[in-house]
């Protein structure tokens, strides 16, 4: 993964993104906090979390966790205050050499990926290959009873065909002119098939659609939007649902 462009089109990503789409993050908070409480009641301990592509935005209560590792391609933004349960580790989930601090922790009870997948793209539009690598590495870091919790806007297949066709043009516009990073939206089928391909079992959770979603600085009503936000959970095949 090339570290191209930036995700910081807002002054303060974590605060601005939540302010623009409060309903979206409330729904994610509700789902994740319930999962963490259920984990505590089942295992009599708080879970250890890996939040890949966190950007410092925590859509859950860190007090319900033992430890949260915020793993991101970019360094911790200056001025971002972290809860004492949180540790920021800079690194690339696509790299074969994951940071030693992550490997030292070993296995995680929850691996969160919120609005990450469509950014796992590069100059050659290798989104499918990169999704598979991300899921494979995440599977290695996931405990036997752990869950991967993906929250992602997915689009119809026809849009990905159009995106792939125009990719060389619009990715140049995004990275060279707008100074942003690579983006390729994903379909539900792409996500579920690749999770299955790396040996993970998937489950689609109900997700209440927010009335608005942010597109860079703007709020777009979701009823006029071709994308749908999904909660996709995955676990090792040995776990009973
Ligand atoms: C759109 S932000 C999502 C932030 C937050 N999770 C949310 O829900 O709004 C995507 C984040 O993924 C990170 N990211 C992109 N590619 C990554 C990679 N290969 N490994 C780790 N983090 C990555 C980016 O640096 C960025 O902070």
Image (cartoon, helix red, strand yellow):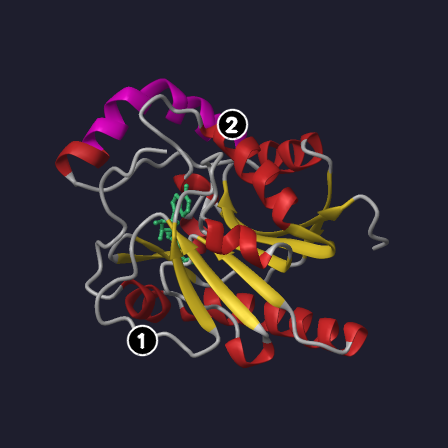
- Residue 183, position as x, y percentages in the image: 35, 37
- Residue 77, position as x, y percentages in the image: 25, 62
Residue at coordinates 36% horizontally, 59% vertically from top-left? 55
Position above or below: 73 against 214: above
The dot on residue 81 is 1
Residue at coordinates 35% horizontally, 21% vertically from top-left? 124
Q: Mark 2 vs mark 1: which is more N-terminal?
A: 1
Q: How many marks?
A: 2
Residue at coordinates 48% horizontally, 62% vertically from top-left? 69
Residue at coordinates 24% horizontally, 57% vertically from top-left? 217
Whether residue 36 appears in this view of the structure is yes
The dot on residue 21 is none
Q: Tell which of 119 and 101 is nearer to you.
A: 101
Position above or below: 233 against 41: above
Position above or below: 109 against 191: below
Q: Main secondary structure of the magenta part?
A: helix
Q: Secondary structure at mark 2?
A: helix
Label 1 CA crowd tier, 10 Å (few <14, some 14–19, many 20+)? few
Label 2 CA crowd tier, 10 Å (few <14, some 14–19, many 20+)? some
How much space separates mark 2 and mark 1, taking CA atoms?
Answer: 34 Å
Q: Which residues are magenta?
A: 156-173
Dividing the picture into quadrants, the one containing residue 81 is: bottom left
- Which of labels 2 and 1 is toward the front? 1
Q: Tell which of 116 and 211 is nearer to you.
A: 116
Left or right: 108, with 155 as reference point: right
The dot on residue 128 is 2
Could you tell me which quadrant the N terminus lies in? top left
Q: Is residue 165 magenta?
A: yes
């Amino acid at each position: 993964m090339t570290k191209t462009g930036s995700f910081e089109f807002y002054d303060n990503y974590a605060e601005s993104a939540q302010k623009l789409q409060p309903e979206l993050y409330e729904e994610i908070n509700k789902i994740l906090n319930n999962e963490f409480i259920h984990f505590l009641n089942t295992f009599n301990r708080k879970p250890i979390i890996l939040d890949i592509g966190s950007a410092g935005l925590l859509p859950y209560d860190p007090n319900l966790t033992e430890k949260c590792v915020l793993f991101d391609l970019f360094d911790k933004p200056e001025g971002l205050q972290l809860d004492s349960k949180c540790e920021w580790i800079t690194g690339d989930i696509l790299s074969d050499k994951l940071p030693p601090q992550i490997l030292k922790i070993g296995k995680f009870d929850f691996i969160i990926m919120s609005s990450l997948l469509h950014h796992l793209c590069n100059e050659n539009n290798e989104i499918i290959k990169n999704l598979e690598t991300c899921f494979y590495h995440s599977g290695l870091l996931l405990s036997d009873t752990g869950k991967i919790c993906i929250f992602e806007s997915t689009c119809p297949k026809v849009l990905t065909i159009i995106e792939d066709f125009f990719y060389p043009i619009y990715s140049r516009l995004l990275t060279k002119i707008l100074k942003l990073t690579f983006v390729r939206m994903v379909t539900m089928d792409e996500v579920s098939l690749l999770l299955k391909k790396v040996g993970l079992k998937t489950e689609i959770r109900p997700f209440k659609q927010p009335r608005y979603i942010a597109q860079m600085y703007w709020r777009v009503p979701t009823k006029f939007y071709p994308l749908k936000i999904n909660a996709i959970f995955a676990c090792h095949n040995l776990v009973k649902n």
